[in-house]
């Protein structure tokens, strides 16, 4: 499936990596024939996508839809926004101004894609789990480790007992010692990093709750989550999708942080006041 075609349908793009061969045929047909799909029944789609009605139903459920009708509504929203979602790939001869314009445009459109993917009830559930947790651990590697560090720094302002680990040995050690009162927040673009999966499974075995931020809603890591928050950036020449998604995942972390701060507004304001007072003292040294 061509990347540019999938750009129009962020829901399909997010799930594509976790689809079976028959389910990918359905996705490919939808992307190539979006107008026709809007008029088709389940039986029609099964014939045209060389699939079965049962597979169509399973495909819809994988995308978080109850059936084809709900999937059509979701696709219609994406199609209505498609004219404004031009794909801005970077060419070898682009000027600095053109590169900056395209990078910024793709980040902005990636954020808009994520707005259509994000489960807002899941955000509030994640906030609830974090607020009642005794300890929070944030796990991630590579680009995702920078997201983890950013979230740990911000969440610390709320007075939460939070630690981030980007080392596989430290992750799995902390995970093995978790309790049912603890939460792990795992961040991964692919959702398939073996070391991270090991750490998350160890945390689950110890009784901890798992919140996942990923670009792929059907990934193995998403399957381990108690709460999954999905959002993805756009891959362009010289910039990987994983790098773009780093900014999207930070934005999801900001949404989560804000929802928690709203529920503990008095504590948030008091902590900010304390921090500013101490930072002010450092400036006088």
Image (tube, rainbow, N blue to C red):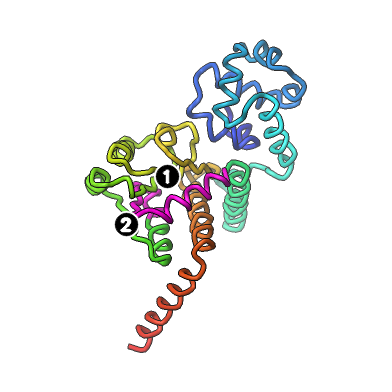
For numbered disc 2, what is the local secondary structure? strand
Estimate how packed mark 2 is, as few (under 14), some (14 to 19) or many (20 or more) residues with alpha carbons within 10 Å: some
Estimate how packed mark 1 is, as few (under 14), some (14 to 19) or many (20 or more) residues with alpha carbons within 10 Å: many
Q: Position of residue 71 (x, y in %)?
A: 66, 29
Q: Is residue 215 above or below residue 160?
A: above
Q: Which mark is residue 211?
A: 1
Q: Position of residue 184 (x, y in %)?
A: 36, 47
Quadrant in which the C terminus appears: bottom left
Q: Quadrant of residue 43?
A: top right
Residue 90 seen in this snapshot: no
Q: Residue shown at 57%/57% (left/top)?
A: 96
Q: Which mark is residue 163?
A: 2
| Circle 2/circle 1 CB separation < 8 Å | no
Q: Residue shown at 42%/38% (left/top)?
A: 225
Q: Position of residue 192 (x, y in %)?
A: 38, 34
| Highlighted range, magenta | 119-148
């Amino acid at each position: 499936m061509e990347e540019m075609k999938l750009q129009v349908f962020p829901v399909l793009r997010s799930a594509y990596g976790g689809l079976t061969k028959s389910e990918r045929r359905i996705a490919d047909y939808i992307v190539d024939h979006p107008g026709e799909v809007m008029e088709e029944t389940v039986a029609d789609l099964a014939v045209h996508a060389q699939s079965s009605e049962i597979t169509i139903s399973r495909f819809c459920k994988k995308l978080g839809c109850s059936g084809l009708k709900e999937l059509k509504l979701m696709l219609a929203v994406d199609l209505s926004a498609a004219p404004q979602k031009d794909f801005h790939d970077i060419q070898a001869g682009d000027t600095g101004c053109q590169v900056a314009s395209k990078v910024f445009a793709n980040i902005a459109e990636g954020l808009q894609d994520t707005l259509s993917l994000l489960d807002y009830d899941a955000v509030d559930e994640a906030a609830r789990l974090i607020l009642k947790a005794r300890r929070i651990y944030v796990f991630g590697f590579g680009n995702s480790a920078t997201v983890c560090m950013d979230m740990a720094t911000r969440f610390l302002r709320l007075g939460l007992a939070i630690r981030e680990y980007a080392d596989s040995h430290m992750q799995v050690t902390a995970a093995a010692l978790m309790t049912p009162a603890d939460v792990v927040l795992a961040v991964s673009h692919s959702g398939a990093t073996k070391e991270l999966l090991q750490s998350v499974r160890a945390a689950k075995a110890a009784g901890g709750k798992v919140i996942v931020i990923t670009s792929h809603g059907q990934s193995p890591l998403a399957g381990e989550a108690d709460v999954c928050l999905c959002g993805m950036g756009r891959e362009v020449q010289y910039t990987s999708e994983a790098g773009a998604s780093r900014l999207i995942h930070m934005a999801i972390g900001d949404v989560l942080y804000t929802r928690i701060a709203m529920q503990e507004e008095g504590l948030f304001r008091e902590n900010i006041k304390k921090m500013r007072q101490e930072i002010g003292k450092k400036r006088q040294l």
